[in-house]
Amino acid sequence: MATSLQPLRLPATELEKIASKCRRKILTMLEKAQSGHPGGSLSAIDLITTLFFHEMQMDPQNASWEDRDRFVLSKGHGVPALYAVLSELGVIPENELSTLRRINSRLQGHPDRVVLPFVEASTGSLGQGLSIAQGIALALKLQKKKSRVFCLMGDGETQEGQIWETAMSAPKYHLNNLVAILDNNNGQIDGHVTEVMDLEPIADKWRSFNWAVHEINGHSFKEVIGALEKARTEPQKPTLILARTVKGKGVSFMENQIGWHGVAPTAEELKKALAELSGGNS
Amino acid sequence: MGAKATRDSFGEELRELGKSNPSIVVLDADLSVSTKSVTFAKAFPERFFQMGIAEANMIGTAAGMAFSGFVPFCCSFGCFLTGKYETIRVSVGYSQANVKLVGTHAGLGIGEDGYTQMGLEDMNLMRGLPGMMVFNPADDKTTRAAVRFAAEHRGPVYLRLTRQKLPDLHASADVFKPGRGIVLKSGGKLALIGTGATVAEALQAADGLSSYKPWVIDMHTIKPIDKELLQTLATQCTHVVTVEDHNVIGGLGSAVAEALCELGYPGKLLRLGVQDTYGESGLPHELFEKYGFSVAQITRRVDQWMNH
């Protein structure tokens, strides 16, 4: 059946509510699983929420609709954020979220495209998603389709050389249908990105590789929407949205704490976090 | 009898397929003149993607194109391609991407360029990935058949090709059936199994070993290995020899050893090939001689082994 769904274009106020709900889902999932990555899920959730509920044309009922926009989560460890959004869209049943990281679950610790709809790429080995996103974008151009590809990368992830191979090749093929978003939360397992392997000046690097670069606050829905709008009308270049984010955003005791990269909250910590997140948002 | 490098057969067959199958796209990493993907590129420039000297990005891009319905052939030297193992492992293997990896310049057979350009561990690496089929055809006709099969098959494939010319061995492409070895000679207690470039070597060596009435097998598919044929050999032979222009670890010799053991083969196995070492520069025939799988070496070593 032919689908022709427009992007949802929800306003910032609505996006904020959904993202807050997703934050609670993320933390609840992780507490239940007693493993996973809260820091990078919470830094990415506002970006992923905006993509699915504002920017992308897609049909939650029809994952294989060929005119859908694609989302590639290159930073695969942030997948609880994607699962939360997919559950808000009704793609993943609410009760399935508690199976995260359990045996026989579709909700793998890192995304598996073979078992779950709307997971366009299996990721988790860092640095690979942008190449895949580029391949999809290239294919869409060949098929003369207007659909676009969004790829979310971690900042630490861009220490991988393969990312820069794609940084080189995407402009060659004029992939203005490719939008890469860098979740720049300045945290990775061994410390701050600026200490482990500094990436700055990030915007200059991507600009010099011939990408259209927009630097924004990745937690300001207005700014995220604004940057995505600009990407929509980019005539030639691929776009890099440099989203300055906060690792663990939304939970006071997790924010900017490297220790929360890959540690699940205890029941007590979850209670505290949920109480904070319920503050006026639900 | 003619002779042709299997990379040439590949390039020509790919161009043929390009005419009838618009889904085929080809990517190369600055070696199209050597891998012969240039033959396709000239005919279908809009479906050829020059990715520069950046193999990992090429492989990931191919995966993305495969997810969108294309059939990408991803070409480089076997060593450079399979050297990007982690990208192949996740973006192609685990992702079940319909990508065809074409690794040319297999083995010592490339000669003078030396070890760093030789695919000597490529079959080992690719064989370890679930769902990956591994082909190492021995002549023009079966290479073309393997290329056609790869284009039709839905799933990842590794196709290993030679730089050097290989003599025609098969009268028709019909003898090529994926996963089924080709019996070139039926025999008695001794079997010589080759793959790719070494099939012709084994066949020639069989002349000098004719008193043993050896079987000669073209094992063009390394994965899945032909267990049915190996069952026959396990039952009838007391001595089985594998010959490969590849490290004996992880390639033909390993695949045959694993199968024979599981099948309860009570006899002996001799694995000829590169003996867990690196290669070097030289003329191909000098290297085959030094590393122990020239026609003369196969004949001498098998004869000694049979009389041991």
Image (cartoon, coloured by chain):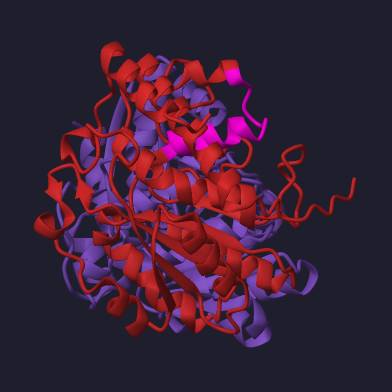
As drawn, B7 above or below A158? below
Q: Colour of chain A?
A: red
Query: Residues in magenta?
Result: A79-94
Give coordinates of residue B50: x percent, y percent. 49, 80
Give coordinates of residue B307: x percent, y percent. 22, 33
Residue A218 left/right relative to B292:
right
> Who's the residue at 39% across and 35% down the image?
B255
| Circle count | 0
Residue A85 highlighted magenta (yes or no): yes
Q: Main secondary structure of the magenta part?
A: helix
Q: Colour of chain B?
A: purple
> Who's the residue at 42% across and 73% down the image?
A214
- Along the viewing direction, whichever of A1 and A97 lies nearer the viewer: A97
- Along the viewing direction, whichever of A149 and B54 lies nearer the viewer: A149
Q: Please indicate, yes or no, whether residue B239 appears anywhere in the rendered image.
A: no
Residue A185 highlighted magenta (yes or no): no
> Who's the residue at 71% across and 55% down the image?
A7
**Furthest residue to the left?**
A195
> Who's the residue at 36% across and 71% down the image?
A165
